[in-house]
Amino acid sequence: MYPSKSIVRISLLLFLFFPARGQAPRNLKVSVLNEATSLPTLNALPRPLHPGLTIGSDFLVSSRNHWQSTLGADLSFFHHRLSENALMLDATYGLGYRFGFGLQPRFLAALGYKHTLAAGEVYELRNGGYEKAAYWGKSQFNARVGFGLQYALNKKYSLTTDYKTMVALPYSKKIAFSLHTLLSVGIEVNLQN
């Protein structure tokens, strides 16, 4: 299966018209994550673990009084042992309120491209039997919303934790979309100081 041309085009348009292009990164964000294919839940760490990694940066940061909004980009990878290996490139938005003691609750949103590869072998039915098939992966559009907490250790380093729900589509011929939850913990390094 080859990537859907319309999904690739939409994803490229997102990044071509992304207002932060040409801006110097303001920070570097690195986090580890756990992915679950599920509805949002109060279970903080669903098991089994499906590990992942996110590396990102904010290019536009606007601060006013205690409010801060950010536009950036993230590159993420996760491995779901029964389902997929996914690589995602997302345009991100964050809105937070920083308290005087350094804690910042945040609303988070992202739109982007997700490319998945099967976690195991792929077979096709040919001439009455199953044969190993070439599989180039699947292109999907993804959208995420969530909330997070950020705590400034000092002017350079902050600890972060985020909980997001992601919708990825198209999923398959019979199921239009898939739902995922992502729980991440990481560090943010301010590159301006």
Image: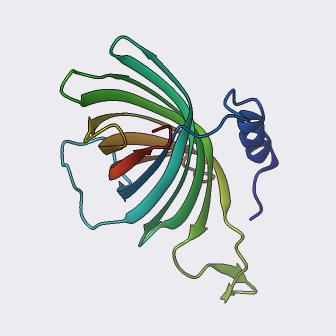
* Residue 51 placement (x, y as % from top left): 37, 65
Determine the residue positioned at 59% across, 40% down.
25
| Residue at image point 80% right, 42% down | 9
In the figure, is residue 176 to the left or right of 78? right
Give the image location of residue 97, x and y in percent: 31, 20
The quadrant of the picture occupied by the N terminus is bottom right
Measured from the top left, where is residue 55 in percent x and y? 50, 54
Which is more toward the observer, 138 or 192?
192
Residue name at image x 50 percent, y 37 percent: 192
Can residue 100 be seen here? yes
Residue most toward the top?
65
Image quadrant in which the C terminus is located: top left
Q: Is residue 89 above or below residue 101?
A: below
Residue 181 visible in the picture: no
Determine whether, in the image, residue 27 is placed left or right of residue 114.
Answer: left
Identify the image quadrant of residue 6: top right
Vertical relation: 73 (above or below) 61: below
Residue situated in front as seen by the camera: 44 or 83: 44
